[in-house]
């Protein structure tokens, strides 16, 4: 099992920045990728950014150029820097971890953190 604890959401003005952090604990050796998804009211959950254990990064096209995802190995933490936030960015942002087991794959989710952007 992997536990994910998020922090860093909140209210920011349009054009501002926020930094989200996700701390993983438990069976972290099984994790091969971590990232962030977001879900706005009435919409499906969508990928925002992800980073693999090898350091490869993937970003949503809608936010590309405004994001930077990074890992802190010592703290087992993944950070997401979001810049130039827009009125269409508000959502609940969820930390996600993908883990591998013996002939099995697992998805782990954090509790979510609200991001609100004021215009």
Image: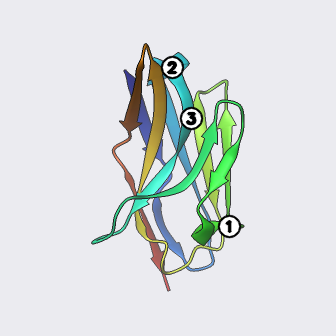
Q: Nearer the viewer, residue 11 or 111?
A: 111
SS for tag 2? Answer: helix
Name the N-terminal-most of marks 3 and 1: 3
Which residue shows up at 51% across the image and 19% down it?
30
Counting other residues with Cα less than 10 Å from the Cα at mark 1, is it few (<14), some (14-19), or many (20 or more)?
A: some
As drawn, 56 above or below 76: below
Counting other residues with Cα less than 10 Å from the Cα at mark 3, is it few (<14), some (14-19), or many (20 or more)?
A: some
Q: Is residue 26 visible?
A: no
In the picture, the quarter occupied by the N terminus is top left
Residue 16 drawn at (x, y percent) = 62, 73
Name the N-terminal-most of marks 2 and 1: 2
Which residue shows up at 42% across the image and 34% down it?
4
Quarter holding residue 85: bottom right
Question: What is the CA distance from the residue labelled 3 to the residue labelled 2?
Answer: 9 Å
SS for tag 1? Answer: loop
Q: Is residue 93 visible?
A: yes
Q: Nearer the viewer, residue 119 or 46?
A: 46
* Residue on which disc 3 sits: 33
Residue 8 drawn at (x, y percent) = 50, 52
Which residue shows up at 38% across the image and 34% down it?
108
* Residue on which disc 1 sits: 66
Q: Which residue, as the protein is rendered here, is positioned at the far top?
A: 102
Give the label on residue 30, or none: 2
Residue 86 drawn at (x, y percent) = 55, 78
């Amino acid at each position: 099992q992997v536990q994910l604890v998020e922090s860093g959401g909140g209210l920011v003005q349009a054009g501002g920045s926020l930094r989200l952090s996700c701390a993983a604990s438990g069976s972290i050796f099984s994790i091969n990728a971590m990232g962030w998804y977001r879900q706005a009211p009435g919409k499906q959950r969508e990928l925002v950014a992800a980073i693999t254990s090898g350091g490869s990064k993937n970003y949503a096209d809608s936010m590309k150029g405004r994001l930077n995802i990074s890992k802190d190995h010592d703290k087992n933490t993944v950070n997401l820097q979001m810049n130039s936030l827009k009125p269409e960015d508000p959502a609940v942002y969820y930390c996600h971890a993908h883990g591998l087991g013996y002939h099995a794959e697992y998805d782990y989710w954090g509790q979510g953190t609200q991001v609100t952007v004021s215009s």
